[in-house]
Amino acid sequence: MGNGRPGCPSFRELMALMDGELAEDLRRKVEEHLESCARCRSIVDSQQRMEQSWRDAFEAPPESGFRRMRKEVMQRDGSSSGSRLLRFGLPVAAALIAALIGLRLFVPGVGGLLGTESPSVSAARRAEETMATTRDESGAAEQAPAGAAGGEIEETAEYAQQQVDTTAITSAEPAEVAAHREPGPSGIDDVPTDATESVSRTGREDADLAVQTGAGEAPAPEEAEEEVDQSFMGAGSGGGAAGCVTVSESVDVSSEDESAGLGEAAPEMTSLEVGQEESAPMSCPPESVWVSQETARQPGEDSLDAAAAYGMGLALVEKDEDAADSTARVRSSISHDGTIAGSAAQWDSTFMLHLTFDSAGGVSSDREQLLDSLAGGWRDSLQGLHADTTVTLTLQRILELVGLP
Amino acid sequence: MLLAVLLMSAAAETPEERELIERARKGDREAFGEIVKMYQNRVFRLARRMSRSDDDAWDITQDAFIRAMDAMERFDPQYRFFTWMYRIVVNLAINRTEKRKRRGEVRFVEEYDGEGSQVVEDQALERAAAEELAEAVKRAVGRLSPPLRAVFVLRVDQGLSYSEISETLDIAMGTVMSRLSRAREAVRESVSGLLGPESAREGG
């Protein structure tokens, strides 16, 4: 990967800079590099130009299209829950049927209208199917083409059967969440977004938080690549090993990164990256996964080994045996505007810090002054949380632990 | 040197939006209608970028809102509505494309296409007119496999942050980055190829 030039950041790093996603230290370094490297500048410039021209070229459709679409959507009377319809619609429908039977007319649509399921039934069904759909949705999809262009009724109905159930991400009872826990790559919608809470409570990432959005590609090689290729990103990214040999190498790279110029660090990062990708499937045990901070912090779980992290709130932890092929998910735990109120704008809540615990549980940090000013009393609050280890957490998480809003 | 891109997607919901969402969750159809109006442009745009024609995009848009309406009661408001909405759109688009793929109608740049490609530094890329470039990118994006395309579109066209993409697609941050990178490299290569033989390929 990378641009093959020693001393230059990788393509990915350049893009991350362009996207505004590099953590502060690395951002400064890459920006400095760009000041003196015409080649990297031209890559970024041409990429921006390309993307901007594509963005600009979008032609918005006429309002009439939207009106038509809204009309189709709003005139559906499936309503949001089958149970509601059953409560209020059934007596009406029953009367209608009786009347029509009396008139010897057949009413085919009634079955469809009443063919909706209550949410709990839907959830149970979803648990049985990898790519599930609720009947009301398939009903919806079948009826949708009526307003759509093109005679694709058959196609629409067919794909509706296979549609991943997006309603799964809505709030779920624990029972529903449990019902979703099926093994295998079950598509992104099988587990509710808010299931992170439940996942956190049970302390492990679920096997079916697969990344595949129905594309059917094998998760394994992808995971291996993900897990190890972000070591270059992030302020003070102390790469810690946690069962992943290649990742542990990044510790040295990162610490050197702090003191060395980008030029020195880059070749190591580049080759490390390549090396990691090559060896990742073999060296990184499949048990190691990236999980959200919340998941990692469960009582009874092994304490975090040092985390290979970057400025986005991930930590590498050891996980239970069961979740064999799980890939992780970052739980966005930051406030909506990404900052912590009251702190200087430069410290956004995804900023990563190291906390080092000695054998007595006493804690120190690479950013003690920062913590002193933003998280007063942090030493006392965090005392004893871990021992003999270094963890990397987001600022947000530390504030939560210290008990600040 | 970084351009500030005008982002279309809402990072935060306004109080008005939240109120509408709350009302819609309780079954207020009129409120949902307002939500449709608020999101229709973004949803259509995402659908259009993910699909191959206006017709497809309208189908997806309509289906997406219908699904959202049906599921609205169960939407958990602690999450951002647009990520939920976008996820529905992306899934619908991907399913539609997967069908076509199974039928052999389309062919994509797959994610694991051998070694990572070298980044192309390209004169032709730089010299091309904006319209030409846009058209080439459009075609290149159409050749990406749906998972790659989704990340590319969400980042480049919708301006979502990596973490928002991660939340929307329910994939790990690492996956977001690797897919995005791969997608961009593939698009770059395609575009260079499309723009003409004078493209100079950067050697390794």
Image: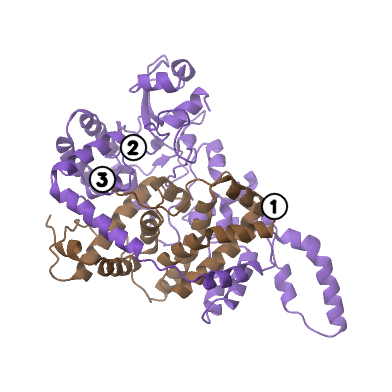
Chain colours: A purple, B brown
CA distance for labels 2 and 3: 12 Å
Q: How many marks?
A: 3
Displayed quadrant of residue A292:
top left
For label 3, the SS is helix
Horizontal and vertical percent for residue A270? Answer: 19, 44
Q: Is residue A113 left or right of residue B89?
A: right
- In this view, B179 is above or below A6: below
Q: Are marks 3 and 1 in contact (CB under 8 Å)?
A: no
Whether residue B116 appears in this view of the structure is: no
Whether residue A94 appears in this view of the structure is: yes
User: Which mark is drawn over residue A13?
Assistant: 3
For label 1, the SS is loop
Mark 1: few/some/many CA within 10 Å (<14, 14-19, 20+): some
The amino acid on which the numbered mark 1 sits, given as a three-letter code, is Lys
User: Mark 1 — on which chain does it sit?
Assistant: B
| Discs 1 and 2 share one subunit | no
Residue lying farthest to the front in this orientation: A63
